[in-house]
Image (cartoon, rainbow, N blue to C red):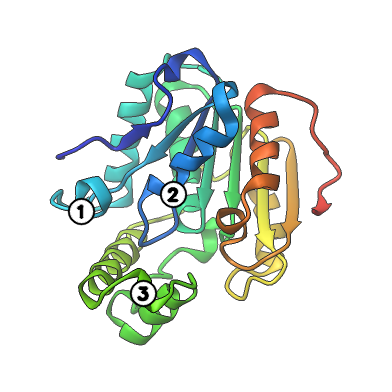
Amino acid sequence: MGGSWLVPWHPRPDEHPLLVCMPPAGAGCGQFGAWQTALGDDVSVVGVQLPGRETRWADPEPSTMGEAVEAVVAELTGLVSTGHPTVLFGHSFGGLLAYEVAGSLWRQWRTWPRALVVAACKPPREWVGAGRGLADDEDELTDLLDARGLEAEDMDEDSRELMLEVLRQDARLSLSFAEPDQPVVDCPLEAWGGRDDLTVSHEHVADWRDYAGGEFQERLFPGGHYFCLETPAPALELLRSMACQSPIDTKGGTL
């Protein structure tokens, strides 16, 4: 289906632990390119690029979440060997996608990532049918876009309409999600939230515990729904530690 689903920012991604980053609804993965610079050679950062945005404007959207997950897993297992040390990170809608990719890696290859990290993401059961109506609700879509804090000078009217259409596309994609028969992930799972997030509550973050088959950690950070994209440094240090398996703070709580 058109262009590549993965965008590696390290020239030798197979020589370092992998951090696979999945963006929020309506966004491309280009925002994670700066994370490679911040992490240096310690970690290889790879972005997941869904069709219809950035370098894939002309590519048709997947018909189901399963189709997207299958394509991501196929490219991922072609990029690095099965069992390569990998951390999956997803923000908001990207968190749901990362959860699905983790489960697919196990079902297809009998391997789990080193860790799954979901940020500003409601637990899977909250996503079932959640996009119904959103794809056609212009006011709700506009509110989602405005929540990003983009200034008027950041985009013209055409750009705004394109971003709204990508949001609609991701809302349609989320409608195809159904909880798997075995919803638990058997790898370390961390759920992160912003203290001031008006979309994903602290209870939503804590409810991810129901999906953890092993270690579980919840953390709260300063900021709102886009806390780790707006102020990435605290998140990056934790992600670096997970990918490289350095000692990390396991007390959870707030940062």
Q: Residues within 10 Å of mark 3 (few under 14, many from 20)?
A: few
Q: Which mark is residue 61?
A: 1
Identify the residue shown where x is 29% and y is 69%.
168
Q: Which residue is most to the front? A: 153
Residue 134, quarter of the rendered image = bottom left
> Of circles 2 and 3, which is in front?
3
Q: Nearer the viewer, residue 228 or 72?
A: 228
Tag count: 3
Q: Which mark is residue 153?
A: 3
Q: Secondary structure at mark 2?
A: helix
* Left or right: residue 12 compared with residue 65: right
Q: Secondary structure at mark 1?
A: loop
Q: Secondary structure at mark 3?
A: helix
Q: Which mark is residue 31?
A: 2
* Left or right: residue 213 compared with residue 59: right
Give amino acid for label 2: Gln
